[in-house]
Image: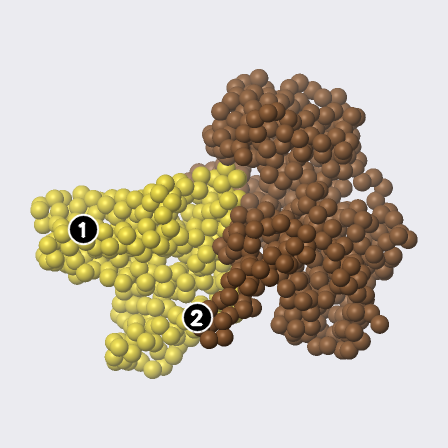
Chain colours: A brown, B yellow
Amino acid sequence: MPLLEMTGICKNFPGVKALDDVCLTLDSGEVLALLGENGAGKSTLMKILSGVYTMDKGQIKIDGDVVDIRNVWDAMKLGIGIIHQELNLIPDLTVYENIFLGREKRNPITKRIDKAYLKQESNKLLNRLGVHIDVERIVKTLSVAEQQMVEIAKVLSMDCRIIIMDEPTDALTTDEVRNLFKVVRALKSEGKGIILISHKIEEIMEIADRVEVLRDGKYIGTRVVSETNADELIKMMVGRELKDKFPKVKIPAGEVVLEVRNLNVPGMLHDISFELRKGEVLGIAGLVGAGRTELGKALFGFYRYSGEIFLDGQKIKLTTTSAAIEAGIVYLTEDRKEEGLFLDKTVSYNMTLATLKAFTGLFGKVDAPREAQIVNDYVRRLRIKTPSIYQSVENLSGGNQQKVLVGKWLMTRPKVMILDEPTRGIDVGAKVEIYNLINELKESGIAIIMISSELPEILGITDRILVMHEGRITGHLADFEATQEKIMRYAISAGGMDLGTK
Amino acid sequence: MEQSKKRDWSAFLRGMQSVIGLLGLCVVLSLLSPRFLKWGNILNVLTQTSLNAVMAIGMTFVILTGGIDLSVGSVLAFSGMVTAGMIRAGFNVWIAVLAGLAIGTALGFVNGLSVTKGNVPPFIATLAMMTMARGATLVYSNGQPKSNLGKAFGFLGQGRILSIPVPVIILFLIFIISYYILGQTSTGRYIYATGSNEKAAKLSGIKTDNIKLLVYAISGFTAALTGMVVTSMLDSASPNAGTGAELDAIAAVVLGGTSLSGGQGSVVGTIIGALIIGVLNNGLNLLNVSSYYQQLIKGVVILVAVLIDRRKR
């Protein structure tokens, strides 16, 4: 008898059939991967299981008994725990306070919280996971990976039998992912049933026993991982074959556009020097915290720095982001929602915000017809799928949102584009579109810096790779010599003697 | 043009429920009191409303950036008092009024400086200004009102142009200018952007600090302008003028559907919000409801209106 059986699940949202007759089974001691593009219904299905949403139709059985899950508490009592993509910890509380939040053991008479007991239990849970985190640390001082471990410990403390993880590896580095998978295997051996929502096929092949694919809210099929391959899964997922995952275009590099000499940002970047040529994609690899994003932002005038930056041979001083934009350097943020988009605003609003001055006439009036014309032009060129340029960007898919931001920066006619994790949280199909777009930009003569944590992507798309570690450049690889192993070695190594920041 | 139409339409929709509320209120009051729909009474409502509305428009700018301005009532009092003092000291009325407006704008600018350069939360920065400006008013006036300000100055609050009261005309002008700035200009977009997502605004090259300085200065200006009109209307600057006015202004903004977290809202909504409060005050007076009950009813109306707005989202 399976641990969990969901059948005929239907869920409608206004105007959308989010789930249409979807089923799922899970055994104890099994890792089931739930695969699908964004909007396929993975998260909705799991939110139904964990009591966040209620289903319109369908049946859920646990151990063969029909259960009724109407809210989060029902799900918890049934032993269903979920680790959301956006972690649900209280940043200002300690690790052990978070683990037992709402379930603190208290002295029966004085009602005082038994801290010693909570700390001890928290330690036990974390040890069981094989991680070493001081339980008295404040959660906001932990890395994302550590916070995730705390979430897992929290779920374990509730004695959950079914553990759902929503895109757990998205914000993790390769090492941290390896560690997470160790924990997943440990949980599996304890007989837990684990559902892993993901769109990273390599990872699924590594960790999952079975994989279920959803597409457009419909059940497409289930495969045993050992009997399938990435191509088949991608085909099931996108409903078509993806011919070329990394369509790299080689063009001869032109003259030097950007030259950075001895760039220093106190506490962040040390002695960064490199050149960037026209029509080149320069990859920047490294672990989380290596200073890649800081480098991107420093070149965008976000920090005070020392050192010299030359653009087209002219020394420039980047004191503000607007100075950078004016000079021709733009930065596409890694955090689309927090730092890039105005979610409640329209496609048009988002695209022209950085270039409004060009549309502004007498008395500061924005020339709306000209604006609309240009936005429509970019929407067409970038193949942005939106019903109208007046659609709120929050209703667009991740890939199209990213294209809106690319469009916004293209309008500034940049010479250098810094793309920070441009494909994070984007479907496989849409990723290829972004890669093609990067190639087009490159061919149009824009020099590109691409920061990425996904090694296959950085190997597949860039012409040259810089590897960073603790705010320094520790490695420099041409694409023909670069391998994942070489990059990792530079990313972990310290390079010089002085480790600077620590 | 499609764009501006589109924007009007969404602002219109957002304002719609408050329009219905306002119309409903008017219908009920006209049935309950025959005096309500008299031309004289309507002008009276508009004049009374214009005081709160002008200030609420300034407040809308601040709230759109995600801030708040608690100092408007005190700024109103201080600038009114300074202008009255200057008139009594024999200064030209125009110069006195310009000085009053300049002082209000400057105080708003100081609010902006505390919020941007000083990194003080808007609530605290403007709370401090509220206390300071009130204190300055009391010090400057020695706690005494300054009255008998002359006919020329009285025109601002009591005069009429083509039988329309001057305060209503002032409101109309301020409304048109604000509507234009927020809806048609790049500055307006930057104001919404700052409130919608400040980080993203900064990373788009928008100088959000300058935008904030601007909105607090605007709020200071509209507060001072209201101070001029109130002082002129009463022919007297009272050290207690505008006490609690910030709450009426915030209530008008919120009733108009502007989000307190910033980035969403319009001055059209604010005008309607101010009218709802104005009509309610007027109606309750006409119906001889005691002032104690008036407070109670106003509070309930604000809560219910906001609850309805919440449920719609």
In the drawing, does residue A329 fall left or right of residue A364?
right
Q: Position of residue B21 (x, y in %)?
A: 43, 72
Q: Can residue B47 be spotted in the picture?
A: no
Q: Secondary structure at mark 2?
A: helix
Q: Secondary structure at mark 1?
A: helix
Q: CA distance from mark 1 to mark 2?
A: 36 Å
Q: Which mark is drawn over residue B136?
A: 1
Q: Residues within 10 Å of mark 2 (few under 14, many from 20)?
A: some
Front residue of this view, candidates B173 and B187: B187
Who's the residue at 57% across and 17% down the image?
Answer: A313
Mark 1 chain = B
Who's the residue at 71% across and 31% down the image?
Answer: A489
Q: Which amino acid is tagged 1? A: Ala
Q: Position of residue A486 (x, y in %)?
A: 75, 30
Q: Can residue B216 be spotted in the picture?
A: yes
Rendered view: A77 above or below A219: below
Which quadrant holds residue A469?
A: top right
Q: Which mark is drawn over residue B305?
A: 2
Front residue of this view, candidates B12 and A17: A17
In the drawing, does residue A320 fall left or right of residue A352?
left
| Marks 1, 2: nearer the viewer | 1
Rendered view: B176 above or below A221: above
Q: Which amino acid is tagged 2? A: Ala
Q: Position of residue A188 (x, y in %)?
A: 77, 59
